[in-house]
Amino acid sequence: MKYYDVAIIGGGASGLACAAILAKNSRIKAVLIDAGERLGKKLASTGNGQGNLSNVDMTKKHYHGGNIGLAEKIACGDSQVYKRLFNCMFISDDNGRVYPAGKQASSLCDMLIAQLGNTEVIKSKALTLKRGFEITLENGETVKSGRVILCVGGKAQKQFKTDGTAYKLATDLGHTLTGLYPSLVQLKTDTKHIKTLKGIRADCEVSAEASVKKVRGDVIFTDYGVSGNAIFAISPYVADKSGSYITLSFLPEFDENAVYEALNARLKSGVNIEDLLCGTLHNQLGRAIMKRAASDDLRKIVATIKNFTLPVLGTLGFDYAQVTKGGVNMKEVTDELESKIVKNLFFAGEVLDVDGDCGGYNLQWAFASGMAVADEILKRV
Ligand SMILES: Cc1cc2nc3c(=O)[nH]c(=O)nc-3n(C[C@H](O)[C@H](O)[C@H](O)COP(=O)(O)OP(=O)(O)OC[C@H]3O[C@@H](n4cnc5c(N)ncnc54)[C@H](O)[C@@H]3O)c2cc1C
């Protein structure tokens, strides 16, 4: 049986960040255990392969979960905390999304792996975790460790070995989970009014009934409901609420009055009511709006354009989601992310009940929480 001072279970964004900081103290005997064939495989595919690792607007309004105060302290306390991990140049886009200047997500993995120093890496799935700590692995090995950090992620996209089975490592030790929901994901909606729109993309402002959140971006109509970057961005605000709805406002650059004036002028110029929206909206979308308004009343037509509601029936599920909403209950961890149930057991990243908006917030949380735990352990040894 092998003995280590620290065992990090999960070699994704948070586990690699944690291991990189711990490796700065070469006297600590650390092991990084990961179920995948490649460390940081999910990290390497983030941001469409470009690695959107943070955001310029690092404020608590972009975080959700059980202890927003703590999430804010850790993720937003130093908004550029990632610079402790990555010694490279960065760029940001119009939405504040921060990328490594080379825009290659896999380079983030390369930079982290290069900092692992003497850390031993075991590529095998951790099957059980017992107090003490004793970890049994799928490859038949058993590992003992004085401290354990669970960095096993959530259950979004199981092809990255994040299938949700690892939550058991925490629950077997007495921890509880909140409800788990897919987030940053396509939405299934009532399709009654969008049946004819499959494949059509529209620039919209999307709002969620249950919050003040409004998002501007693309909406793509599908046979199950809606996709597109605006839908991903609004999904954290509806994914865990049953019976919610979203509202699409087409022609987002114009308010209702401006749209009314423009369409009224068209009518006055002699355009037929059936052709009213031609040129202003995609023809199929225009027809769907006229059908839904079911009226020649211009006010009603404009109201349908600006308030196109869709009841949300669910999401496309964890296999399509970028992140898991929910996780290990934040009430069961200290401000240092140590278990209140089992001393010397720590958590970092998506496994906890913290999730962020689209735009770099989830990687910021993963890196910042992984580093915070490593700093705490370095303080104690
Ligand atoms: C396609 C995609 C794109 C994304 N793009 C972005 C983006 O641009 N910006 C952003 O901020 N966020 C993005 N995210 C979300 C972000 O990648 C995650 O929130 C983040 O990686 C979570 O880090 P983590 O360390 O908690 O978990 P992960 O990075 O998921 O790592 C968990 C690790 O644990 C390992 N593991 C699981 N179970 C076990 C076990 N039993 N034993 C051993 N190892 C185990 C897995 O192999 C995995 O390597 C994206 C997610 C996806 C799926």
Image: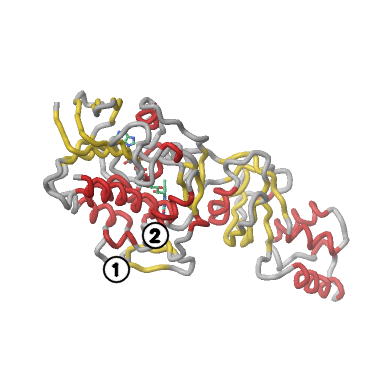
Is 47 in front, or is 343?
A: 343
Q: Position of residue 179 (x, y in %)?
A: 52, 35
Is 298 in front, or is 360?
A: 360
Q: Is residue 101 visible?
A: yes
Q: Give the mark nearer the N terminus: 1 vs 2.
A: 2
Q: Position of residue 272 (x, y in %)?
A: 85, 66
Instruction: Give the quarter of the image for residue 327.
Output: top left
Badge 1 marks a residue whose secondary structure is loop
Side of 221 where 173 appears, left or right: left
Q: Is residue 137 visible?
A: no
Callout 1: CB less than 8 Å from ligand 1: no
Q: Position of residue 379 (x, y in %)?
A: 23, 49
Side of 111 where 57 appears, left or right: right
Instruction: Give the quarter of the image for residue 202.
Output: bottom right
Q: Amino acid at mark 1?
A: Met
Q: Amino acid at mark 2?
A: Gly
- Label 2: few (<14), some (14–19) or many (≥20) C-alpha neighbours in 10 Å: some
Instruction: Give the quarter of the image for residue 56.
Output: bottom left
Is 24 in front, or is 160?
A: 24
Callout 2: CB less than 8 Å from ligand 1: no
- Seen at 16% across and 44% down, the residue is 119
Quadrant (top left/top right/bottom left/bottom right) for the N terminus: top left
Badge 2 marks a residue whose secondary structure is loop
Pointer 1 with pointer 2, Cβ within 8 A? no
Quadrant (top left/top right/bottom left/bottom right) for the C terminus: top left
- Seen at 17% across and 52% down, the residue is 24
Q: Which mark identifies residue 73? A: none
Q: Which residue is mark 1?
A: 89
Q: Which residue is mark 2?
A: 77
Side of 63 where 252 appears, left or right: right
Counting every numbered tag in the picture gives 2
